[in-house]
Structure formats: structure tokens, C-alpha cells
Amino acid sequence: MKNNNGNTKLILLHPYIQKQAGIGTNRLWLLALVSFFTLAFLGTLIYSRDSILTSSSPPVSSAPSSSFPDKHVNNHNHQPLPATVINTLIHYTARSNYTYHMLQPDIKIVADVLRKCSVPCNFLVFGLTHETLLWKALNHNGRTVFVDENRYYAAYFEELHPEVDAYDVHYATKSSEMKELVATAKEQARNECRPVQNLLFSECKLGINDLPNHVYDVDWDVILVDGPSGEWPNHPGRMSSIFTAGVLARSKKGGNPRTHVIIHDYYREVERVCGDEFLCRENRVASTNMMGHFILERADPNTFEFCGKRDNRTSPTS
């Protein structure tokens, strides 16, 4: 290298500098190597932990055959309510100041049927009423579904009580049309209004076919008809709910072959006539002024008569 005077100078690199540069490079390689083995060790450790947890975890149970989206059902821990709790709930519900409520003897009919279920009951209720929360409570750990004519009230009730499963349905009938509708259903008993059928695909005017699909897949053990309204001629009346209850009971695929169907306000003409026509007198096991209690058997798919020729003196007992 030349200086300003044009003279050439020789610059020698000291061995110490070269040594320091070599040491820095070695340290970098060592650090990279240590980091690689550390990451490899952590990866192996995490993978081994996940494998152990997966192999030791119990298998996930399959969904029930009905595929019913009811997270409140507990079929594995059926603990019926103590009698004192049941009696207390009935006592205070029956003594409510609410104008339209069931009397204690009528509530007890439903409660006794639910109590006799050996497994959690599948309980279908037509009508959101003063007793709704009571029915939900009495069917402890069971599946309880409510069907109501008022879509806004059904949505409001579910929002107020998220544990309740409620659906709305549109009724295209009137109480004043009862005789014509019953006659037509009997005439079409071999076609659209068959006693055994999948109502989801039915065109029978008395058949309720617009509920969610999974409702039709459930084998209902108890059906309570306490809706829709039917006090006046222009009200929907309970022709459809009684007809539908009868078809659901006869069309069961599994479970208990018998279904309890209970009609409230049995003193009224629509309830009594439709009960006799579609649930049948020979299936009636008890009745009061307010309640009609029927037990229906699962029927053969080729059955085309709602009521058979059995001796009225022999009725089901359980």
C-alpha cells in the first residue's frame, strides 16, 4: 500500500486477529447446532405427549340413532326425581293464581305416567302453557319437546328459558270444521291419512308435517295434547294434534311399543270426538271431565283402520 509520499508500506495482519475471526465463526456454528438439536428434542417431546393422550383417551360415543339435537338429554344417568320434589312441584303449580291452569288431580295423571318410565321419557307436548316448566322438570333427564301455534311466543319462551325446546307450527284448521275434517280423514285412511305413516311426507290436512325432521324420528313415549286453542269456532282446534299424536304412536320404529296419549279439556266436543275417532275408545284407560288417557300400541304398516274390532272390555293397562 502506498502512503501520500508515494512510498510503499507493507501491512501485516496479526495472527491474533485471524484467530479471533475463526473463534467467532465456530461459535456461530456451535450455536446453530445446539438450536437445531433443541428444537428437534422439543418437537419429539410434544409429538410423544399428544400420542400418549390420544391413545389413552376414551373413544367418543356415537350420536343417538334419532340424531335429535337435544343437549339436555342424559340417557346414561337416569335419576328420577324424589317423590317429595314431584309432589311439591305439583302442589305449587296447581295453586297458582294464573287463570288457565290445570287442577292438581289432572297434573297428577301426567306426572304418574312420566314417573313410571323405566328410562328417560321421550315426552311431546302440544301447547306452551302455565305448566310448561313443570313438564320439563318432571321429565328429569328425559327429552321434552313443546309445539305451539304462536311462533312469537315460542321464540320468546325459548329465549326466556334456554333449556326448553319449543317449535311453532301453523294450523290450517278451525274448530267449526271438525266434522268435515274428521270425515275426510276417515275416507282417506288408505291414502294420505293412513294410521301408520311418515307424517313428514303426508298431505293429509289433519297431519302436522312442518315440524323439524328429527321430531318425526323420535319414538315418543308420552304425548300430551294441550294445544292449540279451541275455545271458539274460529280457533284452530285440536283435531290435527290429536290425529298426529295417534299416527306418531302407531308409527314407532323402536323403544316401548306402547305410547301414552293424554288429552286435556276432554269435556269439549272436538277433544272427545277426535279422541274416540283417532285414539279409539278401546284404548282409553281412564277419563275425567278434563282428561282423557289413552294407550296406543305400535301398529303394522299395512293397517288402514284407526280403531279395531277389539272387545271394549279389554283395555291396555300400562
Image: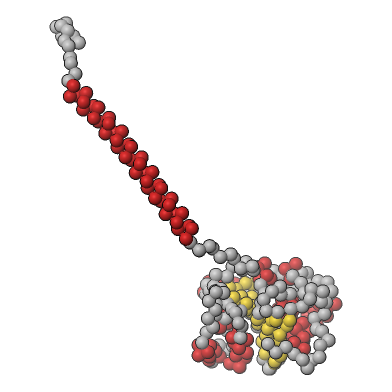
Screen quadrant of the N terminus: top left
In the image, farthest residue toward the left: 5
Q: Quadrant of residue 265?
A: bottom right
Vertical order, 39 against 224 (above or below) = above
Q: Is residue 57 left or right of residue 175?
A: left
Picture mark count: 0
Give the residue displayed 68% in from the left and 70% down from the top. Answer: 217
Question: Residue 285's x, y, as percent?
Answer: 71, 90
Vertical order, 60 against 185 (above or below) = above
Give the residue displayed 48% in from the left and 58% down from the top. Answer: 55
Give the residue displayed 62% in from the left and 77% down from the top. Answer: 122
Q: Is residue 23 left or right of residue 45?
A: left
Q: Quadrant of residue 282?
A: bottom right
Instruction: Please indicate, yes or no, whether residue 92 appears anywhere in the rendered image.
Output: no
Q: How is the image coloured?
A: secondary structure
Give the residue displayed 43% in from the left and 52% down from the top. Answer: 48
Vertical order, 307 against 49 (above or below) = below
Question: Residue 32's x, y, as percent?
Answer: 32, 36
Question: Residue 20's x, y, as percent?
Answer: 21, 27
* Front in this rendered view, residue 117 or 282: 117
Question: Residue 294's x, y, as percent?
Answer: 71, 86
Instruction: Please indicate, yes or no, whether residue 162 appears anywhere in the rendered image.
Output: yes
In the image, farthest residue toward the top: 6
